[in-house]
Amino acid sequence: MAYGNESYDLPGQFFMPTILTNISLDNPAARTEMFGPVAQVYKVHSEEEAIELANHSQYGLGGIVFSGDAKHGEEVATQIETGMVFVNNFMASLPELPFGGVKNSGYGRELSDLGLMAFVNEQLVVTADGPDMHNMAGGLVTPDAEE
C-alpha cells in the first residue's frame, strides 16, 4: 500500500483515499470491483502487457488510458474490454453519453439514445396484398427473377 489505511475520527461514513501497489494477480484486490477512492497501480513492461492486465479482470465498467499521443491512446482504448474508456480524461457521466459495463459489470446501457431504446417496445407491422405461397418471406425478400 503506497497511501491510505489510516484511521480518522470523522462524523458519518468516511473511507480514506487509498493507493494499492505491488498487487499480485492472486491477491483478492486484483479480482475485486472496488467502489470508492481506491486506486490500484500496476507496473508493466510493455503496452501489450498493460492491455493484457487490464483485460484480465472479470469486471469491465470503465477505464482510463493516459497517453502522450491521444490518437494512439484511442487505439489502445479500443483494445480494453470495458463498457467505457476515456483517453487523457477522467470518467464523466452525462445524459448524452451511454453508461454501462461488460463482463460482470453489467449488460446493456443506460442514458443516451441507446439507454432510452432499452425501455421501448417497438412493433413491426408487415403488410402485403395477400399471401404469396411462392415467397414464404411474406414479401420481405424478393425472389430471383430467373426462377
Image: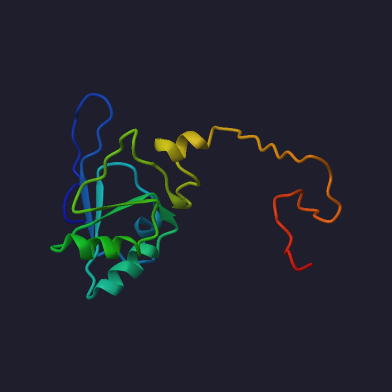
Q: Quadrant of residue 119?
A: top right
- Percent coordinates x, y for residue 2 in the rendering: 17, 56
Q: Is residue 44 left or right of residue 145?
A: left
Residue located 84% across and 45% down the image? 131
Q: Residue furthest left?
A: 68
Q: Is residue 72 left or right of residue 100?
A: left
Residue 113 percent coordinates (x, y): 43, 37
Residue 110 seen: no
Q: Is residue 84 above or below residue 110?
A: below
Q: Quick check: 123 left or right of 147? A: left
Direction right: furthest residue: 133
Residue 28, by quadrant, is: bottom left
Q: Describe residue 52's horizontal placement relative to residue 69 as left or right.
A: right
Of residues 23 and 60, the one drawn nearer to the viewer in this rendering: 60
| Image spot of residue 62 (x, y percent) | 34, 50
Q: Quadrant of the C terminus?
A: bottom right
- Give whichever of 94, 140 is nearer the camera: 140
The residue under the point 70% across, 50% down is 140
Residue 106 visible to the viewer: yes
